[in-house]
Image (cartoon, rainbow, N blue to C red):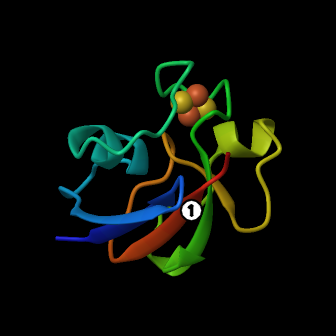
Amino acid sequence: MPQITFTYAGQTKTVQADAGKTLLQAAIDNQVPMEHACGGNGFCTTCLCKVKEGAQNLTPRNDREEMMGVEGDDRLGCQATANGDVAVEMEG
Ligand code: FES
C-alpha cells in the first residue's frame, strides 16, 4: 500500500493510501487539510501540491492538469494517484 507523506502548515503527516485513490482522497481520508474548492474535478488548483519525492510513483499528468497549466514538480492532488511512496508539500 503506498505511503503518502504530506507536508503542510509546518507539519508532516504520513498516511497509507488505498490503491487507486488520489492524493486528495488520501488526504481527506486522513484528516489532512488539502483544499478542494471545485470538489476534486480539476478546475480550481486549490489542491495544488509540490512533489518532493516519488514523482515516478504518480500517475502521469493528465489533460486536466495540462489545461490548468500545472508544470514542473507541481501536481493537482485531485488528479494524481500514487502507485508507490510519494512525498508532497502543500502550498500556502
Ligand atoms: Fe479543484 Fe483539485 S480540487 S483542482
Give the total number of marks visible in the rendering: 1
- 52 left or right, relative to 32: right
Image vertical order of residue 71 relative to residue 45, above or below: below
Image vertical order of residue 35 relative to residue 56, above or below: above
Residue at 27% across, 71% down:
3
Q: Viewer-proximal residue, 60 or 42?
A: 42
Farthest residue in the front direction? 10
Q: Which residue is mark 1?
A: 89
Q: Viewer-proximal residue, 7 or 1?
A: 7
* Whole-percent x, y for residue 10 in the image: 53, 61
Q: Viewer-proximal residue, 76 or 10?
A: 10
- 46 left or right, relative to 53: right
Residue at 42% across, 39% down:
33
The three-letter amino acid code for the residue at tag 1 is Glu
* Whole-percent x, y for residue 4 in the image: 34, 66
* Whole-percent x, y for residue 84 in the image: 33, 76
- Screen quadrant of the N terminus: bottom left
Residue at 21% across, 58% down:
19
* Whole-percent x, y for residue 87 in the image: 46, 72
- Screen quadrant of the C terminus: top right
- 78 left or right, relative to 42: left
Image vertical order of residue 47 relative to residue 6, above or below: above
Residue at 47% across, 40% down:
34
